[in-house]
Image (cartoon, rainbow, N blue to C red):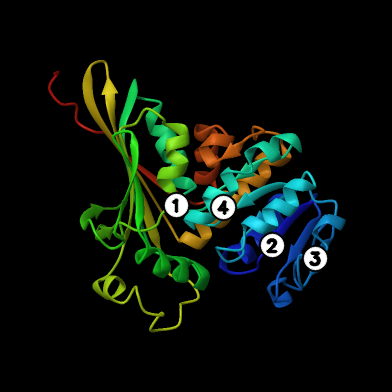
Amino acid sequence: MIGILGLGAVGSQLLQRLNTSLPQIPLFVSGPDRKKVSHLMTRKNSIIFCDSNEKLEDQNIQILVLSCSSGHHLQTAQRAIKNGISVISTSNKLSDVVGLLKLEDEAKENGAVIVAGAAFSPGLTCALVDFASKELDSVDEIHVAKDGTGGPACAKQHHRAMKRPSIEWCDGQWVRRPGGSGRELVWFPEPIAGADCYRAALPDPILLKQLFPLASRITARVSASRQDRFTSWLPMLTPPHRDGGVGAVRVEIRGRLENHSVTKVIGAVSSPSTATAIVTEVLCEMFVKKELTSQTGGVASVCDSTDFLQKIKKKGIRVVEFDGIPEEKS
């Protein structure tokens, strides 16, 4: 059985997708709005709906997708892991990701997998970085950028992240810098094109450092308007939108190939909520097929990034790759 906790913009789409892609697997769905479960949905096996997650341990759940609001993932994940239930968390909140990674020993003891930051960014971005790195002899720098938000919970988390310090890996140590600083014009794939991006409290460097311990710099930024920056310390001035529409991610990897400095750039375009639903759907499919490794980390830590990207492209996420130009030999 697959569990889904949270029926927001991501959870409701994931439910619809799993209904089609894994009709033979029963689903346990927990969320405050049962209307998200369409009466038109038909399955060979049942959908068990619960208004809360109180009965989590009583169900025969093998893997639980946490698609609820960021900040509420760690406690539920701890309960699941104690019962041998693997966890996929869509949270992009720094404290959630750090806390989940600390459950690694407990997960190993109980034979469970923890996938932290399984979203558009982090998540898909981790797979893009790992895929691009396979063409290099070594990786020196990694820079991640994201444009767009998903549903209301995603928009609120973006607002909170902008006012909190970023964490970057720089020359062998973690460095904190003010949120909303470090303006950089980033070119995303069309139709997004250029957007000003800024530092924020993002977990991407934490997950990528696990994959690339020898990299000298790992950074992450998000796009933001002038209003986003100047009002980040206030409550949101307008209600969050139901879905933010099309967004994009971009990863830049600098490294060495045959004694040449090389830069690889890859981007992807999708609605962030849809991309996150696809990421979690593919992870669920790989779990059912026993294609996930038994360890804790980001998307690229628990599966083969090449295989993962092939699967998500078939489901509608557009991936664009640009080749870097080698510099003169030093």
Q: Which mark is residue 121?
A: 1
* Residue 37 in sight in this render: yes
Viewer-closest of 240 and 194? 240
Where is residue 272 drawn, in percent x and y?
46, 60
Q: Which residue bears the numbered disc 3?
A: 54
Seen at 33% across and 33% down, the residue is 172
- Badge 2 amino acid: Leu
Residue 157 in the image: above or below residue 254: below
Residue 84 is drawn in which quadrant?
top right
Where is residue 13 drawn, in percent x and y?
61, 63
Which of discs 4 and 1 lies nearer the camera? The answer is 1
**Mark sitting earlier along the chain (4/1):** 1
Q: Which residue bears the numbered disc 4?
A: 278
Where is residue 161 drawn, in percent x and y?
40, 63
**Mark sitting earlier along the chain (2/4):** 2
Seen at 60% across and 38% down, the residue is 296
- Badge 4 amino acid: Ile
Q: CA distance from mark 2 to mark 3?
A: 11 Å
**Mark sitting earlier along the chain (2/3):** 2
Q: Tell me the crowding category of disc 2: few under 14, some 14 to 19, or many 20 or more residues within 10 angstroms, Cα based.
A: many
* Residue 17 in sight in this render: no
Q: CA distance from mark 3 to mark 1?
A: 30 Å
Dot 4: what SS?
helix
Q: CA distance from mark 4 to mark 1?
A: 13 Å
- Badge 3 amino acid: Glu
